């Protein structure tokens, strides 16, 4: 005679667990496909066309011509190296500052919220807002930075119209803004390190410094990697802060790749070329992510 | 039961009436006084029963509005019928086929007759390839604002040439010995206004970027002289502070309002702020004159202003056209002048007694706007603007020589005008 089927089988019909998983994941996958995959594919497709809305809505297939143009474009390389420099300076910068902030926030304060709030505030401010605030800080006439310099008897500097100074002003702003994000992730990482480990280290005669290098840092590595991945990718897409502070000026000396993409596709309506530039940025981000992920997996094994 | 039948018949009749009503939607920016426009549209609706017009209000700046409109128009959205666009955009709208040409409704002679009524620069800015794509709503232009009190104090007349302006400024600065007083303020930041800064000395020397046939006429020498002039205001003549590359238009306006500039090249909006703002230190002390010229050149200023155009995706273009004609009429120009202090687009309105009563300074403004010239009319204007702005800004920041920047501007312009 028929044995009664197990209860879960009855309630889900004949679906195996695998099929159930499939159906449960489907809506999310569809949504992701619609809002992430489709635009990316569309972008790659458009990048093979000559499509300038200033010449009308018709597109002509041109193969790799846009990419050939990208690699011969001086302005692209200028923007590309600016972006790379921003990544190389602000990612480690934010990591060091963020780690210090996290260590401070992790100290056993009696009242924790002022420290936590100070940690959260830069992270909670919109990027463009930070850019505008720091534009005023670095303003040559009215800015607080020059005010401080001049009180110390130093000469007035034209921060935002001098390429090197403008670049460093942008980097400092980015580090201020992003280190709190790093600090938040690292703080979470710090709080799961059991205090027994430090006590054990202390018993073994380790100094605080050794405790930091031998206990804290190794156990914090996964959190550091996560922070680095996010920070590196967003650093490659840096847009708002330099846009608000200098608009890429003076000339185009502080323009980033994301800003150049916007100029070409939104202002100049050169959709084909703008797409090719965007695909290049996408590929760079993808490569960085793969390298990091490789690292993370290697760490797990 | 009978009652119900009547009721249904009534509903049916009402809905038929609704269906016959024309609905139009106009798009304007948040700074362009939608409240005054509503009043104007109410007049239109009253005169044209069956037509309902509503307003969609967009972002505050020309850039913000265009970012939104690019999305709407690139997806061929029919929800907007009539759009108010910046004077630099008609060529772009024509090329992208976002606008419908007005030539369809205006046969040859009537178009010529109509355009003659407006300030001459608009015939240039709104016609592309011989076809008309937009009609002006309200005007704007750069003025040479000057401190009447300071010029009077030193017995000086407003300058007619740039050389005079330099000398007068030097005289005043030397006499005042006020470290907070600067000479000539202009736009030098990485922003659209810097295109006008570059063009003023080019025009003043008799040159231009392109001729009426859309052929590039600017020479490297003309570009270099213009850039050298602005660099000299800081380094040689010492009539402008060394950080002009930082100056956005509104920063100069605010400083002039605090009494910190002798001269300023600013658009029309500054006038009302100087006269009406509570914190203004220069009430009644500011005058306007046409921009100076170079010896052997001409006085010319940079045209601004906003244009009505018909969306190519509108479902009722004939009605949209009727509305555009009304919105660009002398009657509406007068309302805008009185209620919103907008500069009229028709010279006749400047002389209207009601308008002059509300804005006495329009009498001085008319000779200036009559010398206005359009920025290069091209579908690829944003690229032209980008090349001029970044190079002019680089010269003012002293990261490029005028010679190199002129070369770079010309190289880019040649590429654009050759269609590459």
Image (tube, coloured by chain):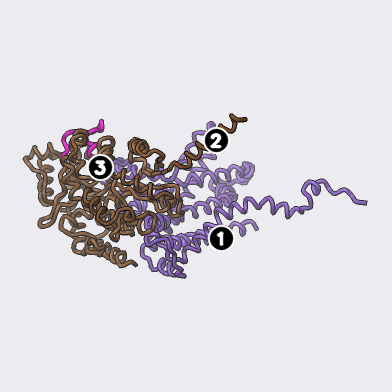
Chain colours: A purple, B brown
Mark with earlier residue (3, 2): 2
Quadrant occupied by the N terminus of chain B: top right
In percent of the image, x 44 and y 55: which residue is there? B74
Q: Secondary structure at mark 2?
A: helix
Q: Was residue B281 drawn as part of the magenta stretch in this picture?
A: yes
Between B365 and A153, the one nearer to me in the picture: B365
Magenta-drawn segment:
B271-287
Chain name for mark 2? B
Chain at numbered mark 1? A
What distance separates the C-alpha of mark 1 from that of mark 3? 64 Å
Quarter of the image where one finds residue B231: bottom left
**Which numbered disc, 2 or 1, marks the residue closer to the eye?**
2
Across and down, in percent, residue A86 comes to: 42, 55
Q: Which mark is residue A210?
A: none
Q: Which mark is residue B330?
A: 3
Seen as rendered, the residue at the extreme right is A1
Q: Which residue is mark 1?
A: A290
In the rendered image, is residue A157 in sight?
A: no
Please indicate whether residue B368 sits to the left or right of residue A156 in the image.
Answer: left
The residue drawn where x is 25% and y is 42% is: B330
Crowding near pointer 3: few (<14 within 10 Å), some, many (20+)? many
Q: On the image, numbered disc 2 is attached to which residue?
A: B9
Cα separation, mark 3 vs mark 2, equals: 44 Å
Of all chains, the one bearing label 3 is B
Q: Are marks 2 and 1 on the same chain?
A: no
Q: Residue furthest left?
A: B155
- Verify CB contact (< 8 Å) between mark 3 and mark 2: no
User: Measured along the vertical axis of the image, is residue A293 above or below residue B326?
Assistant: below
How many residues crowd around disc 2 within 10 Å: few (fewer than 14), some, or many (20 or more)? few
């Amino acid at each position: 005679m028929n044995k009664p089927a197990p209860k879960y089988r009855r309630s889900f019909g004949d679906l195996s667990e695998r099929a159930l998983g499939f159906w449960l994941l489907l809506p999310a996958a569809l949504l992701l496909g619609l809002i992430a995959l489709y635009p990316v594919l569309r972008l790659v497709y458009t990048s093979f066309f000559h499509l300038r809305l200033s010449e009308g809505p018709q597109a002509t297939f041109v193969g790799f011509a846009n990419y050939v143009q990208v690699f011969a474009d001086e302005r692209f390389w200028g923007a590309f190296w600016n972006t790379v420099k921003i990544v190389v300076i602000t990612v480690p910068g934010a990591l060091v500052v963020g780690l210090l902030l996290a260590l401070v926030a992790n100290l056993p304060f009696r009242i924790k919220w002022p420290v936590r709030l100070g940690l959260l505030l830069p992270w909670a401010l919109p990027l463009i807002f930070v850019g505008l605030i720091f534009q005023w800080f670095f303003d040559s006439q009215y800015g607080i930075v020059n005010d401080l310099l001049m009180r110390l008897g130093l000469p007035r500097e034209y921060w935002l119209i001098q390429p090197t100074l403008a670049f460093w002003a942008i980097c400092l702003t980015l580090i201020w803004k992003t280190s709190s994000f790093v600090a938040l992730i690292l703080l979470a990482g710090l709080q799961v390190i059991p205090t027994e480990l430090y006590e054990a280290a202390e018993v073994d005669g380790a100094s605080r410094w050794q405790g930091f290098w031998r206990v804290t840092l190794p156990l914090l590595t996964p959190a550091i990697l996560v922070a680095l991945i996010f920070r590196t990718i967003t650093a490659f897409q840096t847009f708002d802060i330099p846009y608000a502070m200098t608009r890429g000026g003076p000339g185009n000396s502080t323009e980033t790749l994301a800003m150049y993409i916007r100029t070409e596709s939104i202002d100049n309506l050169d959709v084909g070329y703008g797409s090719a530039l965007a695909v290049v940025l996408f590929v760079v981000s993808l490569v960085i992510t793969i390298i990091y992920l490789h690292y993370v997996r290697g760490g797990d094994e | 039961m009978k009652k119900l039948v009547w009721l249904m018949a009534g509903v049916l009749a009402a809905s038929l009436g609704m269906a016959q009503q024309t609905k139009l939607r106009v798009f304007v920016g948040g700074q362009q006084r939608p409240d005054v426009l509503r009043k104007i549209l109410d007049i239109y609706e009253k005169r044209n029963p069956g037509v309902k017009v509503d307003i969609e209000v967009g972002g505050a700046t020309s850039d913000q509005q265009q970012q939104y409109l690019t999305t709407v128009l690139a997806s061929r959205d029919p929800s907007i019928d009539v759009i108010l666009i910046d004077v630099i955009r008609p060529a772009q709208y024509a090329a992208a086929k976002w606008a419908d040409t007005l030539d369809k409704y205006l046969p040859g002679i009537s178009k010529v007759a109509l355009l003659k009524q407006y300030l001459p620069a608009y015939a240039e800015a709104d016609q592309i390839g011989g076809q008309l794509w937009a009609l002006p709503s309200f005007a704007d232009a750069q003025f040479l604002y000057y401190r009447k009190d300071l010029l009077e104090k030193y017995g000086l007349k407003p300058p007619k040439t740039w050389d005079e302006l330099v000398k007068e400024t030097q005289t005043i600065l030397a006499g005042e010995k006020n470290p907070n007083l600067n000479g000539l303020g202009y736009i030098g930041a990485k922003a659209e206004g810097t295109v006008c800064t570059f063009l003023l000395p080019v025009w003043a020397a008799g040159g231009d970027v392109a001729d009426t046939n859309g052929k590039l006429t600017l020479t490297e020498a003309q570009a270099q002289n213009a850039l050298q002039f602005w660099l000299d205001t800081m380094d040689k003549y010492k009539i402008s502070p060394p950080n002009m590359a930082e100056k956005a238009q509104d920063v100069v306006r605010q400083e002039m309002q605090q009494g910190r500039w002798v001269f300023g090249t600013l658009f029309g909006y500054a006038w009302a702020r100087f006269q009406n703002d509570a914190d203004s230190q220069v009430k009644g002390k500011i005058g306007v004159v046409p921009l100076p010229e170079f010896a052997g050149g001409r006085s010319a200023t940079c045209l601004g202003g906003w244009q009505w155009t018909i969306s190519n995706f509108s479902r009722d273009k004939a009605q949209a056209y009727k509305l555009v004609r009304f919105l660009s009429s002398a009657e509406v120009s007068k309302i805008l002048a009185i209620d919103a202090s907008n500069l009229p687009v028709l010279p006749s309105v400047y002389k209207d007694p009601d308008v002059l009563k509300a804005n006495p300074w329009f009498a001085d403004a008319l000779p200036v706007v009559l010398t206005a010239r359009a920025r290069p009319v091209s579908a690829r204007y944003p690229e032209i603007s980008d090349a001029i702005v970044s190079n002019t800004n680089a010269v003012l920041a002293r990261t490029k020589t005028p010679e190199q920047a002129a070369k770079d501007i010309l190289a880019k312009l040649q590429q654009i005008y050759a269609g590459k």
